[in-house]
Amino acid sequence: MLDLKFIREKPEEVKDGLTKRGEDPSLVDKILEKDNIRRQLIGQIEALRAKKNIAEDKITNLQGKEKEKAIEVLKEAKKVLEEKEEECEKIENELRGLIVLLPNLPLPDVPLGQSDKDNVVVKTWGQKPKFNFPAKDYLSLAEALDIIDTKRASKTSGSRFGFLKGGAAILEFALVQFVFDRVLKKGFVPVVPPVMIRPELFRGLGYIDKSDEEAYRLEKDNLYLIGTAEHILGAMHADEIFEEKELPKRYLGFSTCFRREAGSYGKDTKGILRVHQFDKLEMFIFSRPEDSAKEQQLLLQLEEEIMQGLGLPYRVLRICTADLSRPSASSYDVEAYLPSEDRYRETHSNSNCTDFQARRLNIRYRQNNSQLSFVHTLNGTALAIGRAIIALIENYQTKEGFIRIPKVLWPYTHGLRIIK
């Protein structure tokens, strides 16, 4: 959530940020109009309270009919005051409802753009594999080896699900250990979190202000299933105050994630690239505002180290203003190369959400001078495991249709070196 004081003092800057994101800047005027009404009402309420207090003091010195008359006047004043307070509360609720519709503002160095086509490639790493045979897609290879089974998953659970079996299941847990060994060295605390979250906290992250059609909601329990560990890790410290020496606070969460894929009908309907349930390792950081840019570079560095360690060719995109998620002020994507498609597909993302989420969730830190300020929050994919398995299958396939396992994973694969 944006700071109302900031909106009030720099409305043109807020409008400019909204325009860069392709959002309607007129919302700022509506917010300022409501804020002006609210401030007028607050002034009226304070004046009425002061008069009421003076009248109550005077009544004690009155007698008879004079006192009765004063009591009647006081009753009327209290009634007017209650009406003004109710009106002010209504306006405050309307004002909050408008402010939460505002996305975060992009940082100054975020490239301008009107769609995802304007995202900027800032780095390409690794050699694309050169096969002396036609490259197969991961699903053909996996089904032939009986390590991914979407047909039986469709029977048990419907479309966009899959069983990971044999070598694919071994790969999943090998990848978890591989990532743990690299990320924990950077001071991240491992967490296995709940996969259900309360609506008010989920809303605090800033992803369901306009629609929750992408999320699974358990109506009977009034809970959501998380779409990534970011959702629950970010909410974990709601209404808490860090001491400055505790920051940065870094977490590495492993969780199953749930998404409806509501906007992807007809896209990647086969296989496990775009599914309703998947496992993921997610990094989350609470930092001081002056450190958040540096912490975002740490997230990107770790994402690249993981991809390089696995030997997967990739590219890094700087996300343009129009393609930022609602809470993000700056984002990068990492995309792995898939030989069967001869293109790159997203495997990682990371975002600096500045104080947008912390302000909504009331997460602050106490500076050495005892002043309280909102922290900055950052999130980054350590590994979307299903997509990593897809990239490994395609880039390490053999002419025989086998899958070589990169040496870096051998310590975790229980003797498995090649999936036949």
Image (spheres, rainbow, N blue to C red):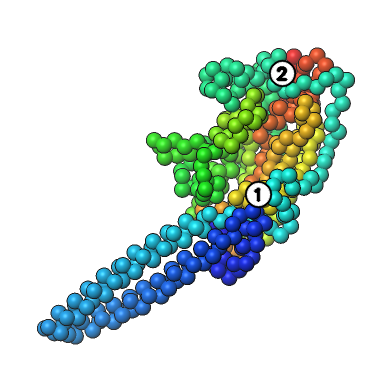
Examine the rendering and report whether any part of residue 315 can be seen: yes
Quarter of the image that includes the C terminus: top right
- The foreground one among 374 and 23 is 23
- The foreground one among 156 and 309 is 156
Quick check: 324 above or below 174?
Answer: below
Q: Residue shown at 88%/20% (left/top)?
A: 132
- When asked about the image quadrant of residue 154, the answer is top right
Quick check: 105 above or below 224?
Answer: below
Examine the rendering and report whether any part of residue 301 can be seen: no
Say which amino acid is labelled 1. Leu
Q: Residue shown at 55%/46% (left/top)?
A: 207
Q: Residues within 10 Å of mark 2 (few under 14, many from 20)?
A: few
The circle drawn on residue 324 is 1
Asked if residue 25 lies left or right of residue 93, the reply is: right
- When asked about the image quadrant of residue 19, the answer is bottom right
Please provide percent x and percent y for residue 374.
57, 59
Q: Are marks 1 and 2 in contact (CB under 8 Å)?
A: no
- When asked about the image quadrant of residue 259, the answer is top right
Asked if residue 303 lies left or right of residue 91, the reply is: right
Q: Residues within 10 Å of mark 1 (few under 14, many from 20)?
A: many
As helix, strand or loop, the secondary structure at mark 2 comes to: helix
Which badge, 1 or 2, is on the more N-terminal residue? Answer: 2
Please provide percent x and percent y for residue 213.
52, 39
| Residue assigned mark 2 | 140
Q: Residue shown at 76%/41% (left/top)?
A: 304
